[in-house]
Amino acid sequence: MSAEIRIKELRERLNYLNYKYYVESKPEATDYEFDMLMRELQDLEALHPELDDPNSPTRRVGSDLTNAFSSVQHAYPMLSLSNTYSQEELHEWADKLTKEIEQEVEFVCELKYDGTAISLTYENDRLVRAVTRGDGTRGDDVTENVRTIGYVPLELQTPSGLPSFEVRGEIFMTYTTFDRLNKEREEAGEQLFANPRNAAAGTLKLQQSKIVAKRGLQFVAYQMEGRELPFTSHSQSLDNLRRWGFPVSSAARVCKSKEEIDNYISHWDEERHNIPTPIDGVVIKVDSYASRRALGRTSKAPKWAVAYKFKAEQALTKLMSVTFQVGRTGAITPVANLAPVHLAGTTVKRATLHNADQIEALDLRIGDMVYVEKGGEIIPKVTGVELSERSAESQPLEYITTCPECGTELVRYEGEAKHYCPNQSGCRPQILGRIIHFIRRKAMNIETLGEETVELLFDSGLITCAADLYDLRAEQLAVLPRLGEKSAANIIQSIRTSTQVPFHRVLFALGIRFVGETTAKYLAAHFLSMDAVMAATREELIEAEEVGAKIADSIVDYFADEQNRTIIEHLRKAGLQFEAEQKQTLSESLAGLNFVISGTFADHSRDELKAIIEAHGGKNLAAVSSNTSYLLAGDKIGPSKLQKATKLGVKIISEQEFMAMIGNQDVAPSQSEIEKPSQNQTPIQGYLF
Ligand code: IVH
């Protein structure tokens, strides 16, 4: 079979499997089968760049090239919707329409997804562009990022026969994905997203589509635009979109009266708490295209649709006190302690206040009656003060200037809203937080120890940092309250076992700010040893994948600290893994050859290519010299490297030529642990309501 035919076959099969997985939530292949087909396609595409296709399913994984977004004019303006919180106003709107149209109007009620709007342009049944709403007239071209979202069809299942049309819809994040993302960010000491909407919008504007691919965004289609669409109503267009492979909400309903609309609203006002998808209301649209044309629009919004927004669930309660929590990174979070109040199914006693600016903006005072809301956020927040109930003697709340735990003067870093306690080495919750992070399952996996025991060990002076764990003896533990000989022995055993935990997890366990699990893996794959990471300059660190200036600075700061270096040496003595595991050798086909890699590549990252070279017995060099056998050149190659190679007569080869040299046995061993995105997400059955 020719490569061309096989590539076509693989693309069709993968598109079909994606459709089953994302649109119908009925996977027809195991992850493994899917991955194998994907790999075969990737390999074939690498060998046949002439058969490239920007819509190939291989593009779902995204690239790490930086996307500078260009702004694009919308062919049809992206209008907003008029809002109402009142069913009475909604009735008035429906009555007015009916009068104007002079006949009974049929409506389509849909959920109002709380994400970010997107316009997808299809030409000859292929996705060609994805643009954000922007100012309604022009938006950002985020096509590369949107291509990574499995729910967006890149090629349509059924040819529509239309030369071009637009599909509008919402890109959103489920609560589960949002929670997971924020948890990861918290662990890496990164700023949290306030709600799933911000997370979806922020993700869509990321510069690296590779990261977008991992974030688990979803898409739902709710509107079609185009010249001479072959439908007479919105409901027809939705049915067709569904047939063509778009995820369309199964909650959309034709409603023929105000009563039916009211029922729809009250059903979803309740039910919204039971679905994984964030929604903030219901959109009511006129179904008939002819009636829509008759009604027209204002400059801002169509007259044929309105959004009924749910009121965020609110409760009024008394602010008893404000306490300040100190996190592992020293970040201070003010917490409101409230008189217990019932809100959206739970009793709320505490609410986050985020930072000093928010307290000031609300002019909060102890004893105030405050409004608490549960919006898209999981943690309730204080949104306002009932001033009519404020006592005359109340005083503005003063934000703390020193750490509530260690008394050190707080600092505020440029561009950050939070205050920090800078006393990393002497502030109890920071030290404890680091030790607790160190023992986590995904780090050193010494969770048999437990947080309480860590506190006990610390307070009794048996440990002052994570490294001291390795000097503990069973008899020291056995005498602690709630621990007996048996659990003491278990703990010692798991501490001992932890010395075998691979290097990238040791790096993660150190708790360097912004170095989460994935970054630690990339660092380990790039530098291969603790000593190399410690010796790396800021510029060298940035060379590693997914490491930007902020992360690099944080790593440099961490290793510049004398105390941290002492802990590292202590851990080294304890026998922890400070080197990446020995790489597997695949062949000796590149033995004796020296490579320099420069530029960016379509199918592999630079680190992957380096790993491939080493796995085949070759060597990587940093700079072009007379020793260089090959310059492996990608896009945006450094001009000086190119010049030097030409001058020295070094052979310059492309990624495809390189892959051919090794018979294209594309396995990058040191990278194989890095999670591959997308297919492995569990589809949420019937996520679209
Ligand atoms: S229709 C001109 N339908 O709400 C009408 N919008 O506040 C086009 N939205 O920008 C929009 N769910 O991002 C429509 N089922 C739905 C929607 C929906 C969410 C968003 C959309 C729009 C915003 C307007």
Image: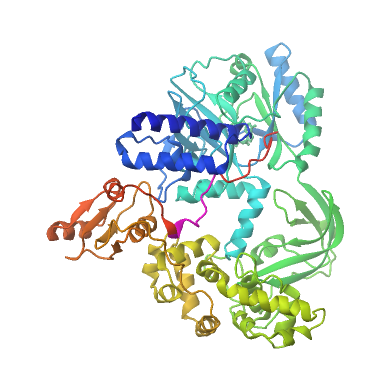
- Pick out the residue farthest to the front: 587
Image side of residue 579 versus residue 685, left or right = left
Image side of residue 278 versus residue 19, left or right = right
Look at the magenta stretch and give its main secondary structure.
loop
Is the residue 494 above or below the residue 32 in the image?
A: below
Rendering quarter of residue 539: bottom left
Question: Residue shown at 30%/63% (left/top)?
Answer: 620
Is the residue 85 above or below the residue 378 in the image?
A: above
223 or 680: nearer the viewer: 680
Q: Quadrant of ligand 1?
A: top right
Question: Residue shown at 47%/72% (left/top)?
Answer: 555
Rendering quarter of residue 193: bottom right
Q: Can the viewer see residue 567?
A: yes
Q: Position of residue 141 (x, y in %)?
A: 44, 40
Q: Quick check: is 675 in the magenta stretch?
A: yes
Q: Position of residue 418 (x, y in %)?
A: 61, 67
Image side of residue 583 versus residue 448, left or right = left
The stretch of residues the image draws in magenta is 670-678
Q: Position of residue 31 (x, y in %)?
A: 56, 43
Q: Quick check: is 639 in the magenta stretch?
A: no
664 or 334: nearer the viewer: 664
